[in-house]
Structure formats: C-alpha cells, structure tokens
Amino acid sequence: MSDTSSNDAPNVALGSTDRFGYEWKNYAQIIPEHERQLERWMGSTGLASFAGKRCLDVGCGMGRNPFFMLKNGAKEMVAVDVDEGSLGAARKNLAGDPRAKVVKCSVYDLDPKELGTFDRVTNIGVLHHLAEPERALEAMWAMVAPGGDLCLWCYGKNGNELILPVIQAFRFLGSRLPIGATHTVAKVTTAVAWPVMKRIPFRTEYYNHLKTLSKKNVESIIFDQMLPHIAHYWTRTDMEKLVQPLHGDPTIELVQGNSWHVRVVKRA
C-alpha cells in the first residue's frame, strides 16, 4: 500500500502504488523465513496471540503476513490493499483458506460500516510510507473493536543511523527510475553486496540476521527499499506522538535493534 488514497489520482500517478504491486508480483512466493521475520516484527505480542481473533491487515501486499496470521490461528482475516498486482498475488496466496477475504481499499477509505470492526488491526511496514500517517492511524483505529488492538511495525531511526544515508541515496535513485531499471539495479546490488555483507560484523541484530536469509529474500528487501517516494524513519518519541491521539493503551518496543513494534489496545 502506498502513500495515496484510491480516490487521489494525481498521487497515484507518482507511482508508489504500482511499484509495490510490481514488487509483489515478482516476489510472490511465501517461504518459511517470512514467518520468522513476522514473529520478530510482532515483538512481545507474538504470532500465537492471533489465535481466535477476527483480523484486518491493512496494506497486505502479496498476502504473506495474513497467511502466517491465519496459520497461527486467526479466526477470520480481511486483507486490504490498493494495487491490483498486490491484490492478485494476495488472492493466490490466500485462496486455499476460507477464513480469508481480500478487498481492494485504501487505508484512508476504511469504513467500519462496510467491513465491521475487528479484534486486531495490523499494519506491517506500511505506515512509514504514507503521506498522512496520522490520518491513516485514525482510520485504522476506527476499525478496532473495543477491547481489541492495533499492531504496527515501522522503520526506526535508532540502529539505522550509519547506513541510512546509503539507503536514502538508493531510494532517491530507485524511486525515480523506470521500475524495470530499479529492479535491475536491485539485482546487481544484491549480487555485489551478498558476499561482502556475510563478512561484516554488524552490531545491529537486523543486519546480522540478513546474513542468514536466502539471497532471493535479500534481493526483495533491497528492491523494496528502493521503491517508495516516502519512507519515514521514526524515533521512540515520534512513535509516542503518532499514537497519543488514539487515546488507547500503547506498548512501544524496539525490535531487531532498528525498528518499532507498537501495540495499542482500545479500552472496552
């Protein structure tokens, strides 16, 4: 899901939406390491906590996170995104599970009158790409049932200080090139960086963990980093300010040494 509303044609023309759709069409295979990745992103909340819950995943991409939420016992899953490439991949990956429903909808257009409310609303790796994160949080919060929760995973400024200028330079280039050219740059970068990064003694858990992933997965991560026009890297104070207007009970955790897991419980 990009930084745009489905009704905002000028912003859609910027290309974030269809660029992510291109990504998920080309990296649509769900692999076991994706589950371990999601477990880390969920921090102390954990995947086991999905058992028995009616869930909404906002910005589902190719459906890998909803897939593992269902695997871990979610009672029902509504997965939403705005790009047809992403939605097509999600429908294929979730087709075998009758508990899953894939819906085309912008985060800004979420309506509890249409979809109902949920025990848990998740937004994994999407909020930091949105032009109006506060508005998106308000829309997602309206979808949370009393006693339910909103779970986020967002980029952190902490732990990324040294490498962030490199990431931003690649994003500046990749978000402006034709999508095929960006994909080629990502592949070449991975081929060059893959043997080098295995020898670097990183201090951050996330970057050390990258060395254990498959080359294809690392390629998809590098490609993903190059696509968006917007990518916020937030501090703990930033996260506190973002969720404060929700008037819920928040838990904010630094996970993998460079990103935030946030869980906000709506008071019953």
Image (cartoon, rainbow, N blue to C red):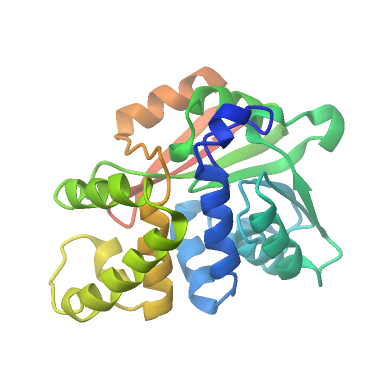
Relative placement, left or right, of 188 versus 268 is left
68 in relation to 81, above or below: below
Q: Residue at x 57, y 28 (%)?
A: 10
Residue 119 percent across, percent down from the top left: 72, 42
- Residue at image x 18%, y 53%? 163
| x and y percentages locating residue 174 in the rendered image | 35, 52
Residue 15 image point, x, y percent: 51, 43
- State left or right for residue 125 relative to residue 171: right
| Quarter containing the N terminus | top right
**Quadrant that contains the C terminus:** top right
Q: Could you tell whether 191 is left or right of 120 in the image?
A: left
Please tell me which residue lies in front, 117 or 7: 7
Which residue shows up at 70% across the image and 55% down it?
87
Tally of numbered discs: 0
Q: Is residue 215 visible?
A: yes
- Regarding residue 247, the answer to whether it shows in the image is no
- The quarter of the picture where residue 8 lies is top right
In which quadrant of the rendered view does residue 117 lie? Answer: top right
- Give whichever of 119, 84 is nearer the camera: 84
Tell me if 113 is positioned left or right of 65 in this view.
right
- Return the residue nearer the eye: 88 or 252: 88
Q: Position of residue 259 (x, y in %)?
A: 35, 48
